[in-house]
Amino acid sequence: MGRTIKQIQGDTRTFTITVYDSDGSVYDLTDYTVRFTVKANKSTVDGSASISKTGTVTDAENEVFTVALTNDDTNIDAGIYYYDFQIDNGSSIVKTVESGIFQVVQDVTDTSY
């Protein structure tokens, strides 16, 4: 299991992830799709995930992608969830590059006024 990400409920956030091959070399992300998924239960189908976002490959040759979360994305119930970042080339390679706990902490300030 990877790291724990603490996210304040309703706050925006951008993740910038660098992907390394198993030997630490550059992992070319040309033609890859990036997905970020957050679920309360790992067995939940992706269509019912609490957060499901497609990332953007920002530097394919240097294995960098970003995933941006809006305040609507993170406005979910406070609690413990599971997350992963996954890359997929659309044919033969699907790779989970990071996974772990996604902890949503209740926001103090009510911005709905």
Image (spheres, rainbow, N blue to C red):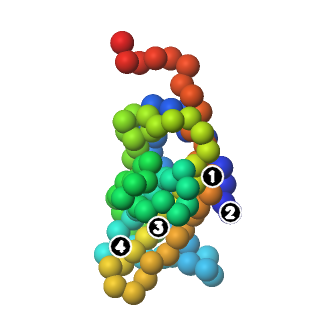
Residue at the (53%, 63%) spot, across then down: 43
Q: Which residue is mark 1?
A: 101
The residues tagged by marks 3 and 1 sit, at their Cα atoms, a distance apart of 15 Å
For residue 6, side relative to residue 52 (left or right):
right
Q: Nearer the viewer, residue 74 or 17?
A: 74
According to the picture, the residue beneath numbered tag 3 turns out to be 86
Quick check: can you spot residue 58? no
Question: Is disc 3 in contact with disc 1, using a CB cutoff of under 8 Å?
Answer: no
Q: Amino acid at mark 2?
A: Met
- Element assignment for label 4: loop
Q: Dot 3 surroundings within 10 Å: few (below 14), some, or many (20 or more)?
A: some
Give the distance between the C-alpha atoms of the residues marked 2 and 1, in whole angstroms.
8 Å
| Amino acid type assigned to the residue bearing label 1 in the image | Ile
Q: Amino acid at mark 3?
A: Gln
Disc 2 vs disc 4: which is toward the camera? 2
- Lower position in the chain sequence, tag 2 or tag 4: 2
Label 2 belongs to which residue? 1
Say which label, 4 or 3, has the lower sequence index.
4
Residue pictured at 39% horizontal, 41% vertical:
73
| Residue at the spot of label 4 | 32
Residue 66, image x, y percentages: 42, 55
Give the structural element (helix, strand or loop) at label 2: loop
Q: Is residue 111 visible?
A: yes
Look at the picture and state if 85 lies above or below 94.
Answer: above
> Percent x, y for residue 23?
63, 81
Whole-number angstrom distance, CA of label 4 to CA of label 3: 10 Å
Helix, strand or loop status at disc 3: strand
Which of the two labelled residues, at mark 2 and mark 1, occupies the earlier sequence position?
2
Nearest to the observer: residue 29 or residue 43: 43
Between 50 and 62, the one lying in front of the other is 50
Kindly state the secondary structure of the residue where label 1 is placed.
strand
